Image (cartoon, helix red, strand yellow):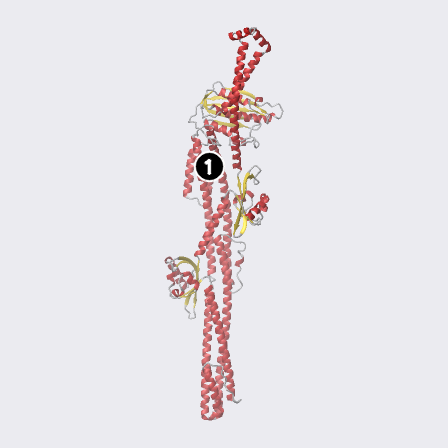
Amino acid sequence: MSIRKKIITTGAAIFLVFVCLALMNIWTHRAVLSNQQIRDAVDKRLSDIEEFERWKNTAIQMVSEAVATGHVHTYANAPFSPPVGPFVQEGALIEKAGKSLIGLIVEKESTSGKIEKTFERLRIEINDLYYRLDERISTVLAKAQFDQVLGQEASEQNALAPYVLKSLNQLTLVFQNSLISRNFSEEDRGLVAKNQRFLSSQLHLIDPDGTIGALFEKLFDRFKTLDAFILESRTSLEGFDTRIEQAKAAFEKAVESTEVQSMAASAQSDLDEANRRLEEASGLNLTVVVVFLFFVPLFLITIGIFGLDTIIVDPITALMKAMKHVETGNFDVTAPVGAQDEIGKLANAFNVMAKEINTKIAEMTHLNHVLQKSEEKFRLYMENTHDGVLIVDDDFKFEYVNSQMSHILGYPLEEIIGQDYRYFIDEESVRLVAERHRLRRKGVDVPSRYEFTIVRKNGEKRNVQISVGVTKDSNGNEKSVGTLLDTTDRKIAEQEAQHLRNQLINIINSMPSILVGVDSDGNVTQWNKTTQRCTGISASEAVGKSLPEVFPQMASEMEKIKKSVETKEIIQELSRPGFLEDDSGYEDLTIYPLTSNGVQGAVIRIDNVTEKVRMQEMMIQSEKMLSVGGLAAGMAHEINNPLAGMIQTAGVLKNRLSRPDLPANCEAADSAGTSMQAIVAFMDRRGIPRMLDNMLTSGQRAAGIVSNMLSFARKSESAFSTHNLVELIDQTVDLAGSDYDLKKKYDFRQVEIQRQYASDVPPVLCEASKIQQVLLNLLRNGAEAMQEMAGNGDGYQPRFILRLNHEKEAGKVRIELKDNGPGMDAATCKRVFEPFFTTKPTGEGTGLGLSVSYFIVTENHGGEMNVESAPGKGTTFIVKLPLEPKEPLRRHTSLFGS
């Protein structure tokens, strides 16, 4: 073969070598570009996954907060707008399920508000019944105390009153507990039934007119309504809870259907596969380059042996040395170019190829570094997530867990990797988890998110929530990839916070006082149910607004509130005139400074103390009356002694001056130089006997008045004896005849008295002073009422008609006192015997006179007392006394002590 042919053959061989090298370079370059595209796609996918996960976690947090608190904020719809990206369809599923769940929570919250209003209405109705019953039963007790002051012992009816009051308090306690706990237990129903049986069998003893019994019937009816409504409201709320749980499950299913952890793992798998292919391409390219560059020089050396040393051997030898360097991995070598012939061109081509290979290797090194950084970023994300991340193989063994997973399980990583995951699960949860794992590997559609219990290394059991999916590695092997979240502390905290919040709200709203919280600027922060009821403004309307705006009556107190906040001192105003309802009431105002979480404010408390103040006033008035009564008795006693001397002296004068038949008178006249006949004649002419008779009559009348006053004012010890009521009534009328009020221009002597006494009225066993007190009180009240009509000046004549009859069949004596005064309407007649009830202006009456009279007649004497009246037709009081009480009469106490 000629040299030309050898050269041509060599050139052809070299050409083929470079063609192969070019093809390998092209292939390697395409592999690099493909790897770059895969890396960019993986980065984009990871970025989309991160953004979607952030939005999904925000939505899950908002829904969890709404489910835990049962309250939806006004901005709750904002997190449900999914980000634009490849997960729009998955985000739409979460958005739809989340809005459905939020809607149910809003509906439940609205229904709960309506239920609370109904409970409040029932509480108000039952509290009203309680106050009315307490008032009537307290009246019975007050009557008993008053009678005890009057010297009476307690009757069986009044002895029963404390037990009735205790029964009322027990029933009210059951109601309050039922409202707080929203539960009416069998024990509560038994207690109500027990008290109902007790009241039905005993109440008539203290409730002759049935008013207390009727109120108790209404109270028991409200208890039945409360029991039924508790069951109804509980059923309604449980229905909402069931629907919310279903919506929650649907939401969780929507969240589970959009799990992106498997997508991240798949992206990592694609990245690993691209790296592997790039490494294979690089290795193959390097092998081809090394192989071809080795055999071509060897071929050229063989040609040089046949005589081409000068033209070919030396350049090729140099080129071969350069290739040796390339073979060792040194791509920075340059082959010498001796001439611009074929070998020189080959050397140039070799140098260009070596430079390109060096460039490609540098690019591959850079790509490997970038891939390594991407993998480190991915691992950093996995290691710093709040959820535990795990990968489990076909044999139920952990292949990978992050540090958070190690923290949740309480084991170090080396004790977890390769361990069967069922080893860390509670016995009751093993079957559930294993069955779901098995079904998921078979392709059965099971929920990917569920809860179970794990056992930590120290034996502690914790509640966890897992979200798991199935993926494949580069070899096609299926792996279970999931995230684990410890929910134990969150559930405990949510339950405790909800319990404390509900308990505090119930305590504040159940207090009868007005409670208002304000901040340092005077804006409302707290508004309880009592405040809402008194102002008519709900808490939602009041909170956040200025206190004077929603509570104008407190505008004048803002300076005091500001002072209390600044000085941190409690400010109190006790028994101040009320400004909530009317001017006749009294209230206690207390301002408490408050500092919460560094924010200053105050709590205003307002208590209605009207009844307390009025009771104090009545006690003071009662003490005044007792003092006046004692003073009057003392004065009467002191007047009685000189009055007796005057009457006795008048009688002695009459005997000595008008009795000529007495020897002592005649002797004294004779010794004085006159006679008794002359003295008698003188006395008759001067009208002295008539004067002495007037003196005796007036003195005896005054003595009778003093005697009646002493008898009325003297404290007795329930001395019951038989009395003639005719004499007792006339004696009382005489005593009333001395009653005169200069301020009111009231004089009992101006009243006409008509007596209509039956002749067959027998004596009655009674306490005379107490019956006198009753009659005197009725006469005085009637006379004062008629005096108002007498002031009209139209010829009106005040008149009393006193009737006394014997009801033989009933064994009673009937006393009627009828006047022709202004009369009373039906509403006044119903309340006329209630303690502290009066139609007189403030300060002119205590409202105790008729109630005390009613107690004396009904309790002390076992009788009856009624009133008949109509406006403009006068008033008739009817008192019926038994001839002999059927039961022993007991001593009672008054409202103000013994």
Residue 839 or residue 74, whichever sits in front: 839
Q: Estimate how packed mark 1 is, as few (under 14), some (14 to 19) or many (20 or more) residues with alpha carbons within 10 Å.
A: some
Rendered image quadrant of residue 405? bottom left
Locate residue 548, reporting x and y percent: 59, 46
Locate residue 780, reporting x and y percent: 54, 25
**Total count of labels:** 1
At label 1, which amino acid type do we have? Glu
Locate residue 577, reporting x and y percent: 57, 38
In screen coordinates, is 797 left or right of 334?
right
Residue 60 or residue 584, whichever sits in front: 584
Asked whether the viewer can see residue 294, the reply is yes
Rendered image quadrant of residue 390? bottom left
* Residue lying farthest to the front in this orientation: 671
Q: Eyeballing the image, is 660 above or below 277?
A: above
Rendered image quadrant of residue 694? top right
The residue wearing badge 1 is 217
Look at the numbered disc 1 and give the secondary structure of its residue.
Answer: helix
Residue 149 or residue 624, whichever sits in front: 624
Q: Eyeballing the image, is 667 above or below 182?
A: above
Q: Eyeballing the image, is 36 above or below 433?
A: below
Asked whether the viewer can see residue 482, the reply is no
Locate residue 202, reporting x and y percent: 42, 33
